[in-house]
Image (cartoon, rainbow, N blue to C red):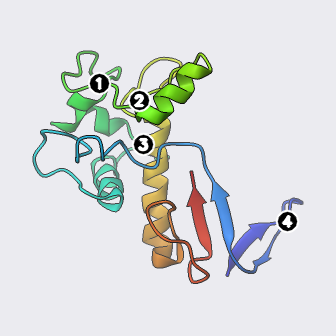
Amino acid sequence: TGTAGNGNGSNESARGSILVGIDFAFAHPFCDENAYYPGLAGTPETPAALWQCIADICKNDGHFYGGAMFAAPGFGDYYLSPRNHGAPHYRSRRRRVAELAAKASARAPSPTFKAIGADNVATGSMAGMRMIHALKAELGDAVAVWPFQPVSPARPVSPAR
């Protein structure tokens, strides 16, 4: 049981499950190269480890901002950002299905490592990953992050992408 707004600005006890839909990348691409940061030793291997890594590196950034990732030794080389326009390891790691669907609608998906320009996805995704980490730290297994974890009645809050 948690609290939920009733639409009038007051809170009342929520019963049952809550589905929360949030529009940001819950993790970077992994399956295409079996790594979030290919070639960088000791990097996270699971979504939860990625969220922890980002939270640790960005712990001094307020309001879930993830800008410290863009300058972090090793990690910063993967992000095209105001701090690193050269970004030697930056490249678009799009899912082929998403790329084809976007092309059919005359659009282009933005990589989660892009942190500059109007179509920057990295900044919001870093904030979102930090928020997920904070939710998991606060609520533990009561929160299921789909599709990375199964949703069940035992987990009443489920952020969904």
Could you say which disc has been placed on residue 91 in the image? 1
Which of discs 4 and 2 lies nearer the camera? The answer is: 2
Where is 84 relative to 71, above or below?
above
Where is 59 relative to 11, above or below?
above
Distance, label 4 to label 2, CA atoms, is 36 Å
Could you say which disc has been placed on residue 6 in the image? 4
Residue 113 position within the rendered picture, expressed as x and y whole percent measured from the top left: 36, 31
> Quadrant location of the N terminus?
bottom right
Q: Residue at x 12, y 39 (%)?
A: 39
Residue 145 position within the rendered picture, expressed as x and y whole percent measured from the top left: 50, 63
Q: Residue at x 34, y 26 (%)?
A: 92
Mark 2, secondary structure of its residue: loop
Residue under label 3: 126
Residue under label 2: 111
Q: Earlier in the sequence, mark 3 or mark 4?
A: 4
Q: Amino acid at mark 4?
A: Asn
Q: Residues within 10 Å of mark 2 (few under 14, many from 20)?
A: many
Residue 81 position within the rendered picture, expressed as x and y whole percent measured from the top left: 34, 23
Left or right of 93? Residue 133 is right
Left or right of 112? Residue 14 is right
Q: Earlier in the sequence, mark 1 or mark 2?
A: 1
Q: Residues within 10 Å of mark 3 (few under 14, many from 20)?
A: many
Where is 158 relative to 71, above or below?
below
